Amino acid sequence: MILQLERLSKAFGSVVVADGIDLEIAEGAALGIIGPNGAGKSSLFNLIGGSLAPDSGIIRLAGEDVTQTPPQARARAGIARSFQIPLPFSNLTVFENLLVGATHCRDRSVADVADMCGAVLERTGMLPLANRRAGTLTLLERKRLELARALAAEPRVLLLDEIAGGLTESECHVLVDTIRNVRATGVTIVWIEHIVHALLAVVDRLMVLNFGRTIADGEPHTVIASPQVREIYLGIDA
């Protein structure tokens, strides 16, 4: 297993964001995570990425305990993520944005990572915009840049946090195709998203969170059809 969570728990006073979560993800898999607002989805990513410390439980990456490992070390070990709101370095070009992440994450020179960054831009459809200032990009282009910046860290596990949010239907299809291409390279994907049809086009497994607790976990269409999931997440009486 590339990523394992064992009884992972976190609370802020009476607000529980992770309630004894157990999770195993095989290398190369694509897991989708859904749940209502406040279910603990982004907090789970913060725990995995290291920006939030758990109250209890264990996080393992490729069998190694990284529970107490700082975020930068986890990034070097192979965990990268995107954020709901893309915040690129606006005055840098698209290519320079990738160079920043690639050089700082791996302690490499620009010469060492330049070709790799170019390949990532091509894979994500951003190569024609390589010399464009990031502050001039459209929302879809910023989302794709966010994805490309995460890939520039050469991750083994890629955490996508509502990357399709705010996109039109046609833009969402473009992004889904890009993520499919990324998955084809063997990167393990864990994707939080409210746009369920986008998830279903990519993932082979779906997990549902509610109040920090796992409600369902399994084959995506089976999970979506569950009366409990329909009632809690979709607001439909079981």
Image (tube, rainbow, N blue to C red):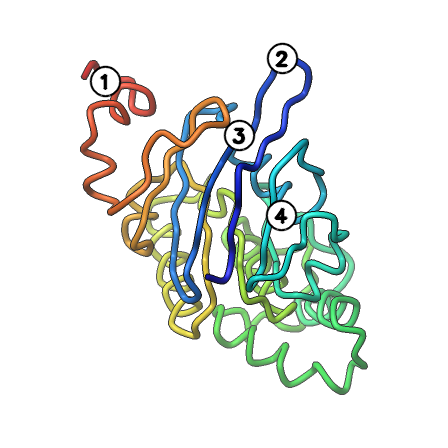
Q: Amino acid at mark 4?
A: Pro
Residue 154: image quadrant is: bottom right
Of labels 1 and 2, the one closer to you: 2
Residue at mark 1 to residue at mark 4: CA–CA distance:
32 Å
How packed mark 3 is, by other alpha carbons closer than 10 Å (few <14, some 14-19, many 20 or more), is: many
Measured along the vertical axis of the image, is residue 187 above or below residue 234? Answer: below
Q: Residue 40 got which mark?
A: 3
Q: How many marks?
A: 4
Residue type marked 1: Ile
Task: Please tell me which residue lies in front, 94 or 6.
Answer: 6
Secondary structure, mark 3, is loop
Disc 2 secondary structure class? loop
Q: Position of residue 42 (x, y in %)?
A: 56, 36
Q: Residue at position x 60%, y 39% from top?
A: 57
Q: Nearer the viewer, mark 2 or mark 4?
A: 2
Going from N to C along the chain, the mark reached first, 1 or 4, is 4
User: Can you tell which of label 2 and label 3 is closer to the viewer?
Assistant: 2
Q: Amino acid at mark 3?
A: Gly
Q: Earlier in the sequence, mark 1 or mark 2?
A: 2
> Disc 3 to disc 4, how far (Cα)?
20 Å
Q: Position of residue 204 (x, y in %)?
A: 29, 55
Residue 174's tag is none
Residue 109 vs 87, above or below: the answer is below
The percent position of residue 94, horizontal first and vertical second, equals 66, 66
Task: Give the labeled residue for mark 2.
Answer: 14
Q: Which mark is residue 236?
A: 1
Q: Which mark is residue 86?
A: 4
Q: Secondary structure at mark 4?
A: loop
Q: Label 2 crowding class (10 Å Cα cut-off): few <14, some 14-19, many 20+?
A: few
